[in-house]
Image (spheres, rainbow, N blue to C red):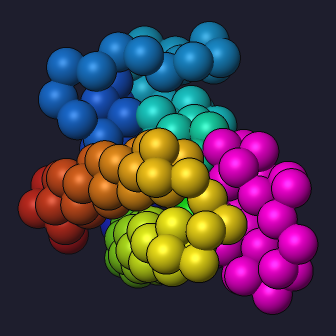
Amino acid sequence: MELGGKNMEAGTERMGCEAGNTELGNGSVSQGKIVRFEDLRVWQLAVDLAAKVYDAFTPCRDFTLKDQIQRAAISVSSNIAEGYERGSNREFVHFLYYAKGSCGEVRSQAHLARRLKFLTDIQAEQLIVDARTLSGKLGSFIKVRETRFS
């Protein structure tokens, strides 16, 4: 996909968001280029995070907190996908920042859920670590997109 004279896929290349990462998942990568958002490692990790949030909150009876953290978790992969589909690097980066912010929401809500005893320490810590790791990967990916494709 050409964007202002630059190839959008080239910045997503094999990295998925970090140099050297060739784990792209579902095989639609063509000649080292990402051909759809589902190939992005950050998107795959975001879907994994959302599934973990859903699993952890299945027994939760506080529907307000449950809904809020599930929406935040879903928002991560959704914003990556929406930004990718927008067709411009500027908008893609903008939506990657939204996704990164949603990772922060998941972390904050996991802390609260632990404190309120809706999650065990182990469950909360795993969600916090996963969200923090994904946020870091998104931050690295944003830097690549901003420096190589602006």
Residues drawn in magenta: 50-75
> In this orientation, which residue lies closer to the viewer: 125 or 71?
125
Q: Is residue 122 left or right of residue 117?
A: left
In this view, the residue farthest toward the left is 147
**On the image, which quarter does residue 6 sit in?**
bottom left
> In this orientation, which residue lies closer to the viewer: 50 or 126?
126
Image vertical order of residue 115 relative to residue 13, above or below:
below
Residue occupying the point 88% across, 72% down = 61
Residue occupying the point 42% across, 16% down = 23
Q: Quadrant of the C terminus?
A: bottom left
**On the image, which quarter does residue 9 sit in?**
top left
Count of numbered labels shown in the rendering: 0
Q: How far across and how far down the image is residue 114, in percent?
A: 52, 67
Looking at the magenta stretch, what is its main secondary structure? helix
Residue occupying the point 61% across, 59% down = 119
Q: How far across and how far down the image is residue 22, in percent?
A: 35, 15
Q: Is residue 21 left or right of residue 47?
A: left
| Residue 139 in view in this figure | yes
| Residue 88 in view in this figure | no
Q: Is residue 149 left or right of residue 48?
A: left
